[in-house]
Amino acid sequence: MILNVYEQKKPFYLYTGRGPSSEAMHMGHLIPFIFTKWLQDTFDVPLVIQLTDDEKFLWKDLTLEQTNHLAFENAKDIIACGFDVEKTFIFSDLDFLTNSPAFYRTICRIQKLVTYNQVKGIFGFTDSDSIGKISFPAIQAAPSFSCMFPEIFNGRSDIPCLIPCAIDQDPYFRMTRDVAPRMGCLKPALIHSTFFPALQGAQTKMSASDPNSSIFVTDTDEEIKDKINKYAFSGGGATVEEHKTKGGNCEVDVSYQYLTFFMEDDQRLEEIRMAYTSGELMTGSLKKELIDILQKMVGEHRQRREAVTDEVVRQFMKPRKLKYDYPAL
Ligand code: TRP
């Protein structure tokens, strides 16, 4: 379907987002954005990024001022992924909702079509959840419809939307796809990034409050090296002897798993997989490969992040026409 759109140069736009609940962003948070940046470059289409400061106010023990500030700070890390200011609109719900009639109207149209019974089934809300939480899904659904952005799309309501996101956001968009035809709108298409494990292994969770569970964009070269060496779960043998005879297990080895995300050279990755599986490549050398790549990536991110001033963020957050070249329009 995407290739078809690509070949025919049919218009579409990208929509993704982030819930700003903490200043600390780790590599797991960046993956959907790195992927989105690739999509934007490859298809040359406009992108909207929703920062749900309202959501995090409703769900977490944070004030409106705090989540709104976090949205602004997180926007800097998102911008540092390399998005094109001419093709990207980033908005905070708290800010944009107060000056966009089209946003609130789209929300109302969605709210009218979803019952309490439905959101209870989809999100597991109970009688003690606040009504803020219960109505929030309509706010995350709205940017899936181009009519929400008259500034960008000249009031066109028929531009299809592609949403790159992590699998945990799927319930929002199953709800969105369900209401779309009844609103006379197009269903958004979804593309999910694969699961990015915590350093301790696939069964454990990455947490912004546990610095050892992942690599953060603020980590120094030294911290990256120490964390990978100390905490990255190894699928290697318990001893050198055992590793050499039995080989390593790439399926559970977190360093190898991370390389599948960050190593650009697929052929080199396959060589590493074979050498590690046969026991020829030691865990220390595998980790070294990853440490080098991560130090470079995080270092470059740090430099780009420093260049993102408040003024740059304000440019991305200004509602405006974006640059796109749709032959059909
Ligand atoms: N709810 C998401 C989160 O907590 C943020 C979000 C809003 C989002 N809109 C989105 C994520 C669209 C992916 C796609 O992170």
Image: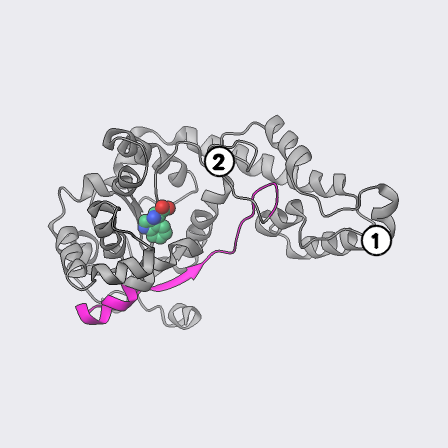
Q: Is residue 104 above or below residue 307?
A: below
**Horizontal relation, residue 2 to residue 226: left or right:** left
Mark 2 surroundings: few (<14), some (14-19) or many (≥20) residues within 10 A: many
Q: Name the residue under label 1.
A: 246
Which of the 4 image quarters holds residue 70? top left
Which of the 4 image quarters holds residue 76? top left
Quadrant placement of the N terminus = bottom left
Which amino acid, mark 1?
Answer: Lys
Q: Where is residue 310 in the image (x, y as percent from the top left)?
A: 30, 29
Q: Which residue is drawn at 27% across and 52% down?
A: 140
Secondary structure category for the residue under label 1: helix
Which of the 4 image quarters holds residue 317? top left
Residue 269 falls inside the magenta stretch: no
User: In the rendered structure, which segment of residues is drawn in magenta?
Assistant: 176-201
Which amino acid, mark 2?
Answer: His
Quadrant placement of the C terminus = bottom left
Q: Mark 2 points at which residue?
A: 301
Asked if the beta carbon under badge 2 is closer than 8 A to the nearest atom of ligand 1, the reply is no
Secondary structure category for the residue under label 2: helix
Residue 191 falls inside the magenta stretch: yes
Q: Residue at x 57, y 50 (%)?
A: 261
- Which numbered disc, 1 or 2, marks the residue that appears first in the sequence? 1
Q: Is residue 119 above or below residue 26?
A: below
Asked if the residue at tag 2 contacts the one at tag 1, i.e. Cβ–Cβ closer than 8 Å, the answer is no
Q: Where is residue 124 in the image (x, y as percent from the top left)?
A: 33, 55
Farthest residue in the front direction? 127
